[in-house]
Image (tube, grey):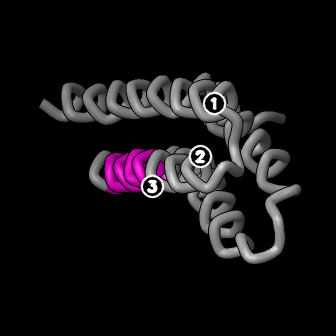
Amino acid sequence: MAFTFEKLIVYQKAISFADSVCALTEPFPRGYGFLSDQLNRASVSVAANIAEGNGRFTVRDRKNFFMIARGSVQECVALLEIAFRRRLLTLDAHVQLRSDLEEISKMLSGLINGLENRKA
C-alpha cells in the first residue's frame, strides 16, 4: 500500500531531483566533499520534509514542514550556484536543476497556500 504523500507530484519531483543531485555529485573531485554532502542533504531534505509534513495531523505542523522543504529548495539554489561557479556543473545541468527547483518551489507554495485557505 502506498503512502498518501507518494501520490503528490511535488513529492515525486523532489525525489527525482534528489536522485539527480546524488548522481551529479558522485564525481565531484576530492576537496569538494563538503559541497557534495551539503547539496545532497539539502536535496533529500526537500522530499523528506514533504513526507514528514504530510504525516502530521495539524495544519500548523504540516505547513511548518512544507515551509522547511521550501527553505531547503532555496538552499539548493545557492549550493548549485557555487558548484556551477567552481565548474563542477555544466551550464545545461545548472539550468535544468534550477528549473526543477523553481517548479518544486511553486508547487510547495501552492501546498502551503492551500493549507492556509483551508484553515480560513
* Residue for point 35% across, 49% down: 67
Q: Quadrant of residue 27?
A: bottom right
Residue 75 disc label: 3
Give the mark count. Answer: 3
Residue that mark 1 sits on: 91
* Residue for point 28% across, 52% down: 60
> How far across and down, in percent of the image, does residue 86 sit?
61, 56
In the rendered image, is residue 102 in sight? yes
- Image position of 10 (left or right of 64): right
Magenta region, residue range:
61-75
Earlier sequence position, callout 1 versus callout 3: 3
Quick one: 46 or 90, which is closer to the camera? Answer: 90
Question: Label 2 sits on what residue type?
Answer: Phe
- Image position of 90 (left or right of 117): right
* Residue for point 63% across, 30% down: 91
Q: Secondary structure at mark 2?
A: helix
Quick one: 109 or 8, which is closer to the camera? Answer: 109
Q: Secondary structure at mark 3?
A: helix
- Image position of 73 (left or right of 2): left
Q: Secondary structure at mark 1?
A: helix
Earlier sequence position, callout 3 versus callout 2: 3
* Residue for point 42% across, 33% down: 105
| The magenta stretch spans residue 100 | no
Residue 84 disc label: 2
In terms of secondary structure, what is the magenta stretch mainly?
Answer: helix
Quarter of the figure with the N terminus: top right
The mark closer to the camera, 3 or 2, is: 2
In the rendered image, is residue 56 in sight? no
Residue 115 disc label: none
